[in-house]
């Protein structure tokens, strides 16, 4: 199940704080934890995935952002990894599905008309959901795509052949509108990682997005 709240990890946090945030969010009922680490080695990334998977402790999906090789390496050493979330410049999702198998969860970033067209022609079962945004500007992804806003997200979601997760500067107040606009769920970084009480912030977002998985 990918519906509901996704926590995307913030690599700007220290490791202890990051693992505490992940554990609190998992305890609050997030549907998935997407492990993002764009500025680290493959070995360090694999070690981080193992630590985060342990903190999640089976309470949510664990998805590796961008790196199918890291997901496979972590699985090889016995770490529970449920799948990947891929960007448009990452490994082709058809190849990723072949490598990860039919039971893995595969998400794919999409925000432009050409991405929508590509999603429509994917073989059935290749991708489970689309990550669509930015909803608002965000400091956690300075090189992000143009801002869609809630209305732009809704138009994209209604035209998409797959469930859509809204991402990009999403705050608690945005969630009801996004869900009404057709979101399958929402993905956040700062709304949880920068909260004084990450568990409470996650619980409030989970409730707004339709409850625990």
Image (cartoon, grey):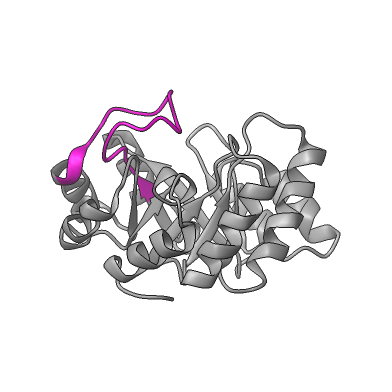
16 relative position to 4: left or right: right
Residue 138 location in percent, x, y? 36, 33
Quadrant occupied by the C terminus: bottom left
Residue 156: where, in percent of width, then height? Answer: 22, 46
Total numbered badges shown on the rendered structure: 0
Q: Is residue 118 above or below residue 182?
A: above
Task: Give the residue displayed 54% in from the left and 67% down from the top.
Answer: 26
Is residue 154 one of those drawn in magenta?
no
Residue 127: percent from the left, percent from the top? 47, 57
Q: Residue drawn 19% across and 61% down? A: 176
| Along the line of sight, the residue nearer the viewer: 162 or 206 | 206
Percent of width and height locating residue 131:
39, 48
Out of 63 and 96, give the one closest to the viewer.
Answer: 63
Residue in the picture at 53% in, 31% down: 89
- In the rendered image, is residue 69 in sight? yes
Name the residue at the front extreme.
196
Q: 154 or 94: which is nearer to us?
A: 154
Q: Quadrant of residue 150?
A: top left
Which quadrant would residue 63 be assigned to in this image? bottom right
Return the residue found at the far top.
143
- Seen at 47% across and 70% down, the residue is 28
User: Visible in this render: residue 121?
Assistant: no
Indicate left or right for 45 with 212 as reference. right
First to last magenta residue range: 131-150
Q: Residue furthest right?
A: 77
Question: With respect to residue 156, does 98 lie above or below?
Answer: below
Q: Is residue 36 left or right of residue 113?
A: right
In the image, 117: left or right of 36?
A: left
Which SS does the magenta portion mostly show?
A: loop
Q: Is residue 141 magenta?
A: yes
């Amino acid at each position: 199940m990918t519906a509901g709240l996704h926590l995307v990890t913030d690599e700007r946090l220290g490791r202890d704080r990051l693992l505490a945030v992940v554990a609190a969010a998992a305890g609050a009922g997030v549907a998935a934890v997407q492990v993002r680490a764009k500025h680290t080695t493959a070995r360090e990334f694999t070690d981080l995935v193992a630590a985060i998977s342990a903190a999640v402790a089976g309470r949510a999906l664990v998805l590796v952002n961008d790196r199918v090789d890291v997901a496979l390496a972590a699985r090889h050493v016995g770490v529970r990894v449920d799948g990947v979330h891929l960007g448009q410049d990452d490994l082709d999702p058809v190849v990723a599905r072949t490598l990860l198998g039919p039971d893995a969860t595969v998400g794919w970033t999409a925000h432009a008309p050409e991405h929508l067209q590509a999603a429509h022609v994917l073989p059935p079962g290749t991708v489970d959901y689309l990550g669509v945004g930015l909803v608002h500007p965000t400091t956690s992804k300075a090189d992000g795509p143009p801002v869609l806003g809630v209305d732009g997200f809704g138009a994209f979601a209604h035209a998409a052949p797959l469930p859509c997760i809204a991402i990009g500067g999403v705050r608690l107040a945005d969630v009801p509108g996004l869900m009404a606009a057709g979101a399958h769920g929402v993905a956040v970084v700062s709304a949880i990682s920068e909260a004084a009480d990450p568990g409470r912030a996650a619980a409030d977002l989970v409730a707004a997005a339709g409850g625990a998985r």
